[in-house]
Image (cartoon, rainbow, N blue to C red):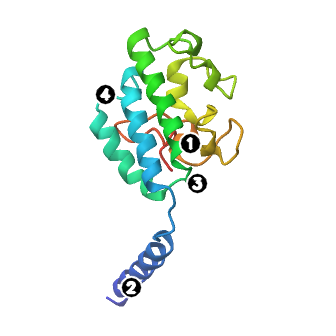
Amino acid sequence: MSLTCCALLSAVCAFTLVSAVGCGTDAQGVDECRQIEETRCVAAKNCGFVSDIPDCQRYYRSQCLHGLPVPPPGSVKLTACLDVIRAAGACAQSSGVDTLLDDCEPSLSGSAADDDLKTTCDLVKEPEKTAECSFLTGSSGGAGGGSSSAAKGGEPSEAGAGGTSGADG
């Protein structure tokens, strides 16, 4: 009996410590993260990454409670980032998932801050590699990985397996 009590007390203490350390109100950029991921979910549908947009958006609503790994951008930068993701999704819808950024109207090739971005769906998958969304990496001028899902290079997934470009964000 005392072994069971000790085990339960130990489990309660461990849960309390982990919960206290893991919870906080210091998340920054929660709304911005949600806007980016909701936009990516819509665009990702056109790329075939997502089949259920509302499910994808619900998943990222929770994932974005962690906020962005960088200070939130201003509204001008955020709007530019959202616009380029929307444009890539619209181009993928009208011209196909393998459409080159140069072949979009207007061309999105000027947005690519990284040579790895070739198609519209590459951009939807990794928006942090665009000039407009480079703030997700924490650097001012280009590509790289960050720690938001949008900055990790994963793709939105209705099952939550993808990311804010990597869903741990």
Mark 3: give few (<14), some (14-19) or many (20+) Cα within 10 Å: some
Residue 11: mark:
none
Mark 1: give few (<14), some (14-19) or many (20+) Cα within 10 Å: some
Q: In this view, does 164 lie above or below 9?
A: above
| Mark 4 → mark 3, Cα distance in angstroms | 28 Å
Q: Residue under circle 2?
A: 9
Q: Choose the circle earlier in sequence order: 1 or 4.
A: 4
Residue 101 in percent (x, y) is at 57, 16
Tell me the residue at 36%/29% (across/down). Answer: 50
* Mark 3: amino acid: Pro
| Mark 1 → mark 3, Cα distance in angstroms | 16 Å
Camera-nearest label, 1 or 3:
1
Residue 78 in percent (x, y) is at 51, 43
* Mark 2: amino acid: Leu
* Mark 4: amino acid: Ser
Residue 69: mark:
3
